[in-house]
């Protein structure tokens, strides 16, 4: 859901960007490690302790065998990413160690983790950063975010003022939102050609608008294709911010230019590459 924080956590422990991490949503687990390892937690800020001692956010932390890592109060953001040097060595499914709950595939039996689960760790293949080094982080939203969008791909299916309406007031993320998409409640978007199209691809971050006029922001587990027109698409650089939002949070959309979208992505990639290069 927040690809930036996933990569950042991995970089801090010397992993490659595609190594499996644990995604912690809204409330966190208690974990016991059976061997010495190095961990890092990026993304949402929680009060995290190792054997009762509070540890820093977004830094490499040495954890001794039999130590307990516990997530307590969530401070900001919705999703944290816990990386371990060497990653989590669950079986590959279609080339990935990720879990897809809807299809019941991947990860540990295709399901969410539960009490008493035991996860094997891989062999470290990089050099973690020292505990005193802090990495650049995308600013975490505090219950509200401003997300930049590019118009399209089907602007012509909407009233001429639809993009202005989209930017006119905040949208609230509904309680029935999930990893597939955020159902939004806010200014109604009016269709010009009707609310149905021939199904086509659904990119990450696209705003799909059904007949209700209330947009759905499609997220990591979105369907591969859909038959509703799409008014605008959140720029890639801002998907990390979107991934840190949860039910009840608000979003204010603002149009940007392709040039600004590209510049934001380049800046974000440079920040990540600097960390990945330093710790590899």
Image (spheres, rainbow, N blue to C red):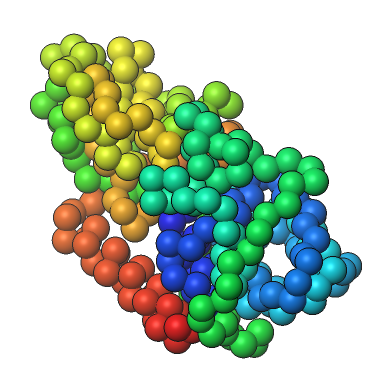
Camera sees residue 175: yes
Q: Is residue 242 above or below residue 274?
A: above
Q: Position of residue 277 (x, y in %)?
A: 40, 83
Q: Position of residue 141 (x, y in %)?
A: 53, 53
**Residue displayed at 16% across by 35% down:** 153
Q: Position of residue 5 (x, y in %)?
A: 50, 61
Camera sees residue 217: no
**Residue displayed at 17% across by 55% down:** 258
The reply, left or right, for residue 193 in relation to residue 26 is left
Q: Is residue 211 above or below residue 255?
A: above
The reply, left or right, for residue 225 in relation to residue 86 is left
**Residue displayed at 47% across by 29% down:** 103
Q: Nearer the viewer, residue 71 or 128?
A: 128
The answer to which quarter of the image holds residue 195 is top left
Q: How many marks?
A: 0
| Residue projecting furthest to the right | 52
**Residue displayed at 45% across by 79% down:** 275
The answer to which quarter of the image holds residue 217 is top left
| Residue projecting furthest to the left | 156
Q: Nearer the viewer, residue 185 or 268?
A: 268
Q: Position of residue 98 (x, y in %)?
A: 49, 48
Q: Quadrant of the C terminus?
A: bottom left
């Amino acid at each position: 859901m927040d690809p930036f924080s996933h990569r950042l956590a991995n970089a801090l422990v010397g992993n490659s960007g595609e190594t499996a991490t644990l995604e912690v949503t809204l409330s966190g687990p208690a974990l016991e490690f059976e061997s010495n390892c190095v961990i890092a937690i990026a993304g949402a800020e929680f009060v995290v302790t190792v054997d009762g001692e509070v540890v820093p956010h977004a830094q490499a932390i040495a954890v001794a065998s039999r130590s307990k890592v516990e997530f307590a109060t969530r401070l900001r953001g919705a999703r944290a990413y816990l990386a371990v040097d060497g990653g989590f060595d669950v079986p590959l499914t279609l080339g990935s160690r990720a879990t897809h709950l809807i299809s019941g595939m991947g990860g540990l039996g295709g399901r969410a983790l539960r009490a008493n689960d035991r996860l094997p760790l891989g062999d470290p293949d990089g050099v973690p950063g020292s505990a005193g080094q802090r990495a650049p982080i995308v600013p975490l939203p505090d219950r509200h975010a401003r997300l930049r969008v590019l118009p399209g791909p089907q602007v012509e299916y909407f009233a001429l003022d639809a993009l202005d309406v989209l930017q006119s007031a905040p949208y609230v993320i509904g309680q029935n939102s999930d990893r597939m998409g955020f159902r939004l409640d806010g200014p109604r978007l009016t269709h010009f050609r009707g609310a149905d199209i021939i199904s086509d691809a659904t990119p990450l971050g696209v705003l799909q608008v059904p007949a209700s006029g209330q947009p759905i922001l499609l997220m990591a587990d979105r369907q591969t294709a859909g038959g509703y027109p799409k008014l605008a698409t959140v720029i890639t650089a801002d998907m990390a911010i979107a991934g840190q939002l949860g039910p009840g949070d608000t979003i204010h959309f603002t149009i940007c230019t392709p040039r600004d979208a590209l510049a934001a992505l380049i800046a974000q990639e440079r920040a990540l590459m600097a960390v990945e290069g330093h710790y590899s």
